[in-house]
Image: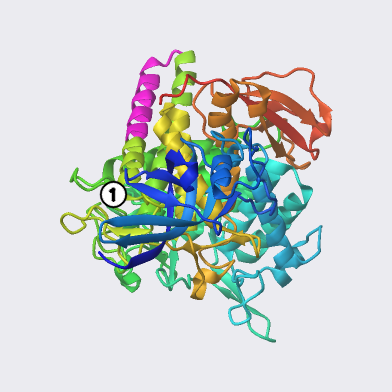
């Protein structure tokens, strides 16, 4: 090859440094090594967060000569074994290869550390994101009412966060996702602004989009509400999303619960729980493949029902008739099940409806069990040569590889999402097994341990496979859509392009962090760090204080068309807030604990505010599905007053009646895991 030049991003580990020639060797995950040449035009820096602060505090080495040119700059910034991101120009001419660096980004100002593992990082990011969303939608308001959402909330926002006047729709599921984000921001920071906004949003969602059955026991959520210029508004019942048009897709109903479930964890608002229960009844009555509903009873949930008949077998559904997919089966787990079970297990005491809550908890546990087992049994490809799961199915669970754009293709983020959530379920089952052993239910405990092992093994298999076939081994990050059976000799064949979407990076970061926590296998921590590095280097929109939906393989923002929107059907304050919330607690629980040997530097806090009208005398505070003996409570503060005594291992804390309505702060301390396995 002659005269070849290409702008390119590289992520890798420095293996050799030659300051005199202002060059170093970078080894990528692929195993390829690049000779990187710096010059006077090369910029050096440390990862920046959305707060815009310059954290370049790289220490000056001994005998540093400030007039020593690029040789001294290289000596200051580049050391062996450090992970760096290099952007530059790759040059090839005959046998000569050279990579001219234009910018070099370090992970921290101290070698061996990662700035996104510091205590402030994800807290600062979630705060800036929440502030900007509220500022964009509501201006300078610091208190919120339902009327504010009615007047000003809008699904579609342009890249600057301004309303798109040509599409003034309020989608229920996107509102719920924003409520999830605001609730998560409150959980991490305790900022009352976020809770006030979430409360107003919850009220608006319930009063505007809820459609109850005649007896009040079933709830469906309307797709949205559209402003009709000067003639009021129109409720839109069926989905307007192109994949689901004129149907009621289950995933939109599922995500209508995302915000309610996270908000309920904070407040225990019984009216919110009641709507969650009503919605789950609709899943069980209208979407579940069971003989009681008149279907084959092969398990799982149909992906769509007809808005007129409320049935999944109506001809009007077209190629969505009698179909099941990842969203209709797997999305129950992260969208609402984990948070509802965390809030209800063990069942809260006090107030009313204990028997009904016990029954609902059993229903949620059943859904968790059946969906996780179906993922384990039905989704992996029977051909061991195919590293990706199947994502769409007919009613009898034969793969549907003819559906519209998906065909026989994989979405990398779905494989990573399965790895993340099956690890969470494995943690929950290990906790159940420990409880059952304590109760001398040995057989049940053994069954749950075996299931936990099966779930974790599949999670590891997918995580390992995606590290090869889904991640960009030269630049970092994970890809989007690929062919499940690529052409011979090509390990990864892209469907449309080698772009990278924001929500799929989230799945990868969380998958590898929790896999590291579950296994203490160091390769997962390395993968998590590389994924987090790419996220923080390329997906943060520093100008508009948001995130980019899509970037190129090299990390350049893709902002054409809907990809440039800050808010829309596919981006609405859910995935990025979920990433910030869970990356913070996973990092504190699994990573910082190993680094600090269990010192208080690894501690973290969650904030709650139980509603005064609940009557509950307990509050469940476990942050996520953890394996036993992973974390403990280090402190509890109610209304600013620290509690003198509490049980470190009891994640259901007692509340007096006069403490309801007060902020509750729970500090957690990770327990020191076994030494990491290099």
The image quarter in which residue 462 lies: top left
- Residue at image coords 48%, 30%: 517
596 shown above or below 34: above
Residue extent of the magenta highlight: 439-457
Q: Position of residue 505 (x, y in %)?
A: 47, 51
To which residue does mark 1 refer?
A: 388
Does residue 24 show up? yes
Q: Position of residue 66 (x, y in %)?
A: 66, 45
Does residue 271 show up? no
- Residue at image coords 74%, 40%: 609
In terms of depth relative to the viewer, which is nearer, 424 or 674? Answer: 674
Classified by dominant secondary structure, the portion drawn in magenta counts as helix
Element at label 1: loop
In terms of depth relative to the viewer, which is nearer, 634 or 13? Answer: 13
Quarter the N terminus occupies: bottom left
- Residue at image coords 62%, 51%: 48
Q: Position of residue 300 (x, y in %)?
A: 35, 49
């Amino acid at each position: 090859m002659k005269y070849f030049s290409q702008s390119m991003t590289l992520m890798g580990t420095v293996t050799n440094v030659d300051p005199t020639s202002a060059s170093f060797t970078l080894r990528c995950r692929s195993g390829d090594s690049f000779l990187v040449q710096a010059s006077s035009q090369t910029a050096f820096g440390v990862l920046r967060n959305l707060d815009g602060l310059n954290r370049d505090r790289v220490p000056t080495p001994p005998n540093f000569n400030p007039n020593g040119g690029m040789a001294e700059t290289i000596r200051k910034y580049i050391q062996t074994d450090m992970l760096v991101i290099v952007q530059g120009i790759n040059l090839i001419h005959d046998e000569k290869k050279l990579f001219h660096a234009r910018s070099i980004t370090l992970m921290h100002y101290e070698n061996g550390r990662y700035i996104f593992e510091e205590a402030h990082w994800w807290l600062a990011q979630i705060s800036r994101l929440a502030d900007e969303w509220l500022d964009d939608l509501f201006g300078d308001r610091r208190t919120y009412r339902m009327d504010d959402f009615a007047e000003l909330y809008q699904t579609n926002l342009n890249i600057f966060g301004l309303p798109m006047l040509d599409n003034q729709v309020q989608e229920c599921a996107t509102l719920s996702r924003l409520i999830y984000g605001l609730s998560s921001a409150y959980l991490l920071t305790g900022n009352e602004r976020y809770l006030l906004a979430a409360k107003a949003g919850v009220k608006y969602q319930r009063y505007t989009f809820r459609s109850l059955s005649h007896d009040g026991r079933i709830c469906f959520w309307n797709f949205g509400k559209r402003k009709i210029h000067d003639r009021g508004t129109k409720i839109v019942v069926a989905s307007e999303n192109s994949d689901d048009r004129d149907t009621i897709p289950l995933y939109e109903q599922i995500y209508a619960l995302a915000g309610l479930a996270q908000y309920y964890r904070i407040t225990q608002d019984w009216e919110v729980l009641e709507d969650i229960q009503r919605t789950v009844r609709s899943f069980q009555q209208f979407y579940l493949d069971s003989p009681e509903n008149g279907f084959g009873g092969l398990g799982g949930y149909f992906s769509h029902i007809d808005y007129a008949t409320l049935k999944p077998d109506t001809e009007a559904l077209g190629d969505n008739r009698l179909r099941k997919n990842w969203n209709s089966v797997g999305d129950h787990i992260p969208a609402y099940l984990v948070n509802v079970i965390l809030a209800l297990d063990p069942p809260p005491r006090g107030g009313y409806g204990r028997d009904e809550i016990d029954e609902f908890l059993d229903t949620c546990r059943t859904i968790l069990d059946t969906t996780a087992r179906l993922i384990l049994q039905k989704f992996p490809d029977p051909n061991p040569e195919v590293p990706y799961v199947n994502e769409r199915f007919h009613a009898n669970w034969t793969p549907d590889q003819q559906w519209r754009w998906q065909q026989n293709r994989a979405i990398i983020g779905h494989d990573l999402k399965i790895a993340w959530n099956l690890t969470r379920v494995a943690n929950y089952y290990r906790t159940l097994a420990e409880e059952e052993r304590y109760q001398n239910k040995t057989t049940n405990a053994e069954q749950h341990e075996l299931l936990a092992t099966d779930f974790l093994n599949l999670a590891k298999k997918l995580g390992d496979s995606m590290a090869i076939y889904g991640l960009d081994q030269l630049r970092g990050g994970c890809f989007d859509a690929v062919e499940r059976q690529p052409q011979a000799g090509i390990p990864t064949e892209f469907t449309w392009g080698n772009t990278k979407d924001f929500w799929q990076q989230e799945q990868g970061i969380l998958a590898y962090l929790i896999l590291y926590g579950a296994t203490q296998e160091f390769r997962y921590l390395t993968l998590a760090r590389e994924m987090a590095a790419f996220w923080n280097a390329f997906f943060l929109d520093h100008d508009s204080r948001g995130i980019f939906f899509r970037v190129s393989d090299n990390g350049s923002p893709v902002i054409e068309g809907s990809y440039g929107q800050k808010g829309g059907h596919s981006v609405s304050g859910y995935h990025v807030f979920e990433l910030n919330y869970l990356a913070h607690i996973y990092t504190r629980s699994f990573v910082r604990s190993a680094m600090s040997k269990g010192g208080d530097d690894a501690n973290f806090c969650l904030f709650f505010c139980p509603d005064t009208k609940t009557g509950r005398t307990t509050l469940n505070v476990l942050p996520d599905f953890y394996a036993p003996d992973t974390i403990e409570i280090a402190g509890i503060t109610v209304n600013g007053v620290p509690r003198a005594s509490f049980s470190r291992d009891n994640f259901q804390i007692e509340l007096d009646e006069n403490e309801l309505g007060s902020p509750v702060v729970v500090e957690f301390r990770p327990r020191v895991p076994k030494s990491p396995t290099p």
